[in-house]
Image: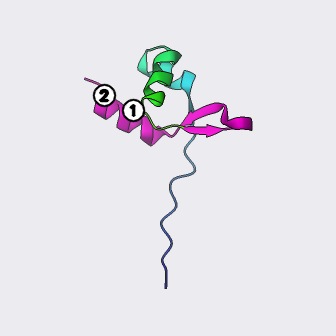
Amino acid sequence: MQTKPKPTDTSAKLLTVREIADRDDCSEKTVRRAIAAGLLEAIRIGPGGRLLRVHPTAHDRYRKLFRV
């Protein structure tokens, strides 16, 4: 019998690049650079995957790892 993995918390609101920039007091470009460098995990959504969203736990991990 195969067990199913526990579902992740899907009730959390995904954050936009702008929301993260506001919370971290930096530019949207800085957030996008962190995503492109693989430092901040993001999800692409929408037509063609143009929109970026970040799960709050991914943002918390990023802040713990890269903030003084």
Vertical placement of residue 68 versus 44, above or below: above
Q: Quick one: label 2, few (<14), some, or many (20+) residues within 10 Å?
A: few
Q: Quadrant of residue 26?
A: top left
Can you see residue 54?
yes
* Three-letter code for the amino acid on which mark 2 is drawn: Phe
Q: In the image, is 45 to the left or to the right of 43?
A: right
Q: CA distance from mark 1 to mark 2?
A: 9 Å
Question: In the rendering, at what x and y percent does residue 8 appear?
Answer: 50, 56
Q: Helix, strand or loop at disc 1?
A: loop
The residue mark sitting in front, 1 or 2, is 1
In the displayed image of the protein, which residue is found farthest to the right?
Answer: 47
Quarter that holds the C terminus: top left
Residue shown at the point (71%, 36%) measured from the top left: 48
Q: In the image, is 57 to the left or to the right of 10?
A: left
Nearer to the camera, 48 or 53: 48
Residue shown at the point (52%, 17%) measured from the top left: 28
The tag earlier along the polypeptide, 1 or 2, is 1
Vertical placement of residue 2 versus 16, above or below: below
* Three-letter code for the amino acid on which mark 1 is drawn: Leu
The residue where tag 2 is placed is: 66
Magenta-span inclusion, residue 31 = no
Q: Which residues are magenta?
A: 43-68
Question: In the rendering, at what x and y percent does residue 56 appear?
Answer: 47, 38
Dots 1, 2 in contact, CB < 8 A: yes
Magenta-span inclusion, residue 57 = yes
Question: In the rendering, at what x and y percent does residue 35 appear?
Answer: 47, 30
Q: Helix, strand or loop at disc 2?
A: helix
Question: In the rendering, at what x and y percent does residue 23 appear?
Answer: 46, 22
The residue where tag 1 is placed is: 39
Can you see residue 46?
no
